Structures are given as C-alpha cells and as structure tokens.
Image (cartoon, grey):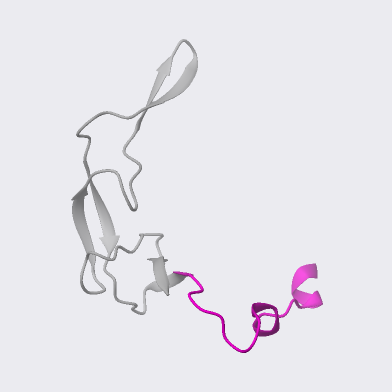
Amino acid sequence: QITGGSDKTGTPMRSDIAGGNRQAVLVTKGIGYKAHKLVRKRGKLYRYTYDGIRKRRYFRGNTITQETRQLNLKVVESGKKSLAALFPKDSESDKS
C-alpha cells in the first residue's frame, strides 16, 4: 500500500489532493506541516504550538508522475516469498 511520497524538490504528496500537479494549500497541523513556532527565551530555543495556526504550503497530488522521486510503502499482506528473499543484502552495496 502506498502511504505517501515526495517529488524531486522534496515536496510531500497528500492523499486528499487529486492529480499529480503541485498546489499551494492552506493547512493546519497534519501531513507536511508540524504547526509550531520556535521561540528563543533566556538563551534557549522553545517550541510552542498555538491554537488556530495555519500556513500556506506546497503539496503534490496523490498521482505518481515523472517528478515523483520517493514512495513510502507499507506491507499489507505476506506472500509466498519473504522480504529477505525479495531484497537480498549485497556485500558490494554495503561497502560503497
């Protein structure tokens, strides 16, 4: 199952946006936005979450296009082969 992804610039994908284009969306806390402000007090940095904070962010739609560079996947059911057999560890790739 595909749970998310991002494009070549790092823009996250959202499941509630149709298509594969890049859109500016006004969002609250959720996918792609943490909704907190960093405030410096007494020489330390604190993270505050305010009620009603929103921000306009760019997101990709839920369609996989040529710009898609990363997909986040989740294994839903097991098949005949194990994951270790499907994705073997190569000693050459570990060295480089």
Q: Nearer the viewer, residue 66 or 75?
A: 75
Say if 34 sits above or below 63 in the image.
above
Say if 69 sits above or below 56 in the image.
below
Say if 45 sits above or below 55 in the image.
above
Image-based side of 51 in relation to 72, left or right: left
- The answer to whether any part of residue 96 appears in the image is no
Image-based side of 75 in relation to 93, left or right: left
- The answer to whether any part of residue 17 appears in the image is yes
Instruction: Check residue 81 for magenta coloring.
Output: yes
> Residue 32 location, x and y as percent?
34, 52
Q: Nearer the viewer, residue 70 or 80?
A: 80
Say if 3 sits above or below 29 in the image.
below
Location of residue 4 (image quadrant): bottom left
- Residue lying furthest bottom: 80
Residue located at (28% from left, 59% from top): 59
**What is the tally of numbered marks visible in this picture?**
0
- Residue lying furthest top: 42
Task: State which region is magenta.
Answer: 72-95
Instruction: Check residue 45 for magenta coloring.
Output: no
Residue located at (42% from left, 19% from top): 40
Location of residue 39 (image quadrant): top left
> Residue 1 location, x and y as percent?
42, 75
> Residue 86 location, x and y as percent?
65, 84
> Residue 16 location, x and y as percent?
23, 64
Residue located at (74% from left, 76% from top): 89
